[in-house]
Image (tube, rainbow, N blue to C red):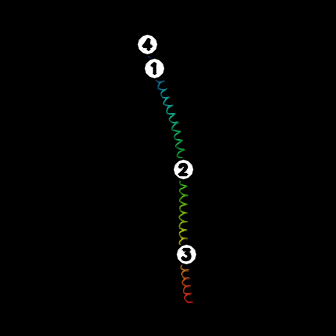
Amino acid sequence: DDLLRVQEEAISSELTTVREDHDRLRETEQLLEFFKEKLEQKEVEVGQLENDLKAKEEFNHDLLEISRELEASKNALEDRRASTEEQETQADVSQGDISLDTADLRRTDLISHEES
């Protein structure tokens, strides 16, 4: 009878251990599933971040191209402005020469008129 009771206690203890192991295994599986879902979410986030980074790199490249084009346009406008100023200066000088020539002609005319 004692032997039977000792065997029952051993079996009961073993059964308790098996149940506890089973519970721990189920908890471990739940944790594993939880972390698996978290990992999948993080992979999606990483994919989105990679796409965002790629889009920003393309945007920065486009901005750099636009900046270069604007710099080239600015330089062309400055060259054109300098050329226009030079032409205006030459035109002013030419106008001044014409004015001097006209004044000389008038003076010569007056002198010729007075002599006559």
Q: Residues within 10 Å of mark 1 (few under 14, many from 20)?
A: few
Q: Earlier in the sequence, mark 3 or mark 1?
A: 1
Residue under the point 52% across and 37% down:
41
Residue under the point 43% across and 12% down:
5
Closer to the camera in the image, 71 or 113:
113
Which residue carries the number 3 mark? 95
Location of residue 115 by image quarter: bottom right
Q: Mark 2: which amino acid?
A: Phe
Which quadrant would the C terminus be assigned to in this image? bottom right
Location of residue 105 by image quarter: bottom right
Which residue carries the number 4 mark? 5
Q: Nearer the viewer, mark 2 or mark 1?
A: 2
Q: Residues within 10 Å of mark 2 (few under 14, many from 20)?
A: few
Q: Position of residue 65 (x, y in %)?
A: 55, 55
C-beta proximity under 8 Å, tags 3 and 1: no
Which residue carries the number 2 mark? 59
